[in-house]
Amino acid sequence: MDIEIRTIEPGQWDAFYTACEAAFGQPAPAEDERASERTVSEVERSLAAFDGAEIVGTAGAFSFRLSVPGAVLPAAGVTQVGVKPTHRRRGVNTALMRRQLDDIHSRDEPVAILYASEGGIYGRFGYGLASFMCGVDIETARAGFVRGYRPAGRVRLLDRAAALEAMRPVYERVWTRTPGMIERTPAWWEYVFQDTEHRREGASTLIFAVHESEGEPDAYAAYRVKHDWPESLPINALWVEELVAATPQAYADMWRYCFDIDLMHRVRAWNQPSDDPLLYLLAEPRRLRFTVRDGLFARLVDVPPALAGRRYATTDRITLEVRDEFCPWNDGRYALEGGPDGAVCVPTTKSADLVLSATDLGAAYMGGAGFPTLARAGRVVEETPGALRRADDMFRSDPAPWCPSMF
């Protein structure tokens, strides 16, 4: 094959997006879907694999600001990665990843993040499983809270425009203190809550509820209702698309609101944090049917600024030997000295305390994967006794990393 990897021209964006959808077995997207995607797409970061004039593979990226423990860093949000079935297993995706990571490196973005269509694809390119997304599915009749809960504040239903205005300050209070969350520009607020027919999957349009304490918004829920009335009996389901709260009280109140809406038989949510306090609010936590699956994957594109850019839970110094075949500029040993107030990371010739791949460093980077856990999986080698515990103490995060934004 004579495949050329290059950035698309503005006039090729529709063909780019259609090729990406074809890679996922989807028909040509409807105009409202294309219009929604255009609002956030960055043509200058949209790479295509061309076989002659035909686009046969795609890889895009968004320019994000990513919350990491104690700080915010520029990051590439990798998206729209796919290869048409006519050109699979021929190295097209590898060529796209090669060019994309080179471009990200040249832009001085120390971290890249993505969601994977299949978890096995991206480890070979240095992406590690950095966070989880968890699902809940509970019958409202069994959704009682533990004794001692008392509601506070009030909940208001708002139209979309008023809701987005009220929701923004809540999200602003939460995203910088939650590793894995991304800053939302005005365009991203519009995009996340676009309400095309494709997104509804047979349910209602989005409904917005905002919780207020002392007149100020401190939580919100965006949800849909899937109506089902067999023999005129309601077994409707409420689908929570996003629920964010700035305080524990507001979080409990917002979920209590969702569970208590009349005519709902079930409440479901598909992207909850792995350390969800809802498990401890429910009198019967088993009834949540809490499920865990892979969430955000992270890749350290440039190890020193990525490690120096975050903050650490304890003050310590540790030497990491990083194995990185796909981005060889990272391959080597690094002395990391850091704590709650800042960090320094520089190349070193000193003996390594821990040896790990770039993939596993990405998994541990935001505190999602513990170093002892990775070692038990055979992914990290401890060269200095006690180094696993020390590294785990440094890198841990509270709260756990979580990204409610799909991209």
Image (cartoon, rainbow, N blue to C red):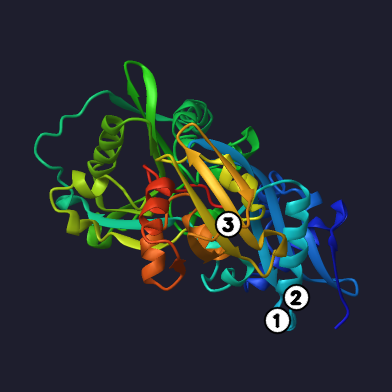
Task: Tell me, for residue 330, which label it has, or none.
Answer: none
Q: Is residue 45 left or right of residue 286?
A: right
Q: Is there any visible trace of residue 13 in the rendered image?
A: yes
Q: Which of marks 1 and 3 is in front?
A: 3
Q: Which residue lies furthest to the left in this view?
A: 147
Q: In the picture, which quadrant includes the N terminus?
A: bottom right
Across and down, in percent, residue 299 comes to: 59, 57
In the rendered structure, which amino acid carries the disc numbered 3? Lys
- Which residue in the structure is indicated by mark 2? 92
Q: In which quarter of the image is residue 3?
A: bottom right
Q: Residue at x 47, y 56 (%)?
A: 364
Work out how far the residue at label 1 is from the one at label 3, CA to CA, in angstroms.
43 Å
* Depth order, front residue of 108/390: 390
Mark 2: give few (<14), some (14-19) or many (20+) Cα within 10 Å. Answer: many
Work out how far the residue at label 3 is from the one at label 2, CA to CA, in angstroms.
39 Å
Secondary structure of the residue carrying tag 1 is loop
Q: Which of marks 3 and 2 is nearer the N terminus?
A: 2
- Which residue in the structure is indicated by mark 1? 88
- Which residue in the structure is indicated by mark 3? 350
Across and down, in percent, residue 30 comes to: 67, 58
Across and down, in percent, residue 83 comes to: 70, 73
Q: Which of marks 1 and 3 is nearer the N terminus?
A: 1
Q: In this view, does 211 lie to the left or right of 188?
A: left
Q: Residue at x 64, y 61 (%)?
A: 332
Q: Is there any visible trace of residue 235 in the rendered image?
A: no
Q: Which residue is drawn at 48% across and 49% down?
A: 366
Are circles 1 and 2 on residues that touch, CB within 8 Å?
Answer: yes
Mark 1: give few (<14), some (14-19) or many (20+) Cα within 10 Å. Answer: some
Mark 3: give few (<14), some (14-19) or many (20+) Cα within 10 Å. Answer: few
In the rendered structure, which amino acid carries the disc numbered 1? Arg
Q: Nearer the viewer, mark 3 or mark 2?
A: 3
Secondary structure of the residue carrying tag 2 is helix
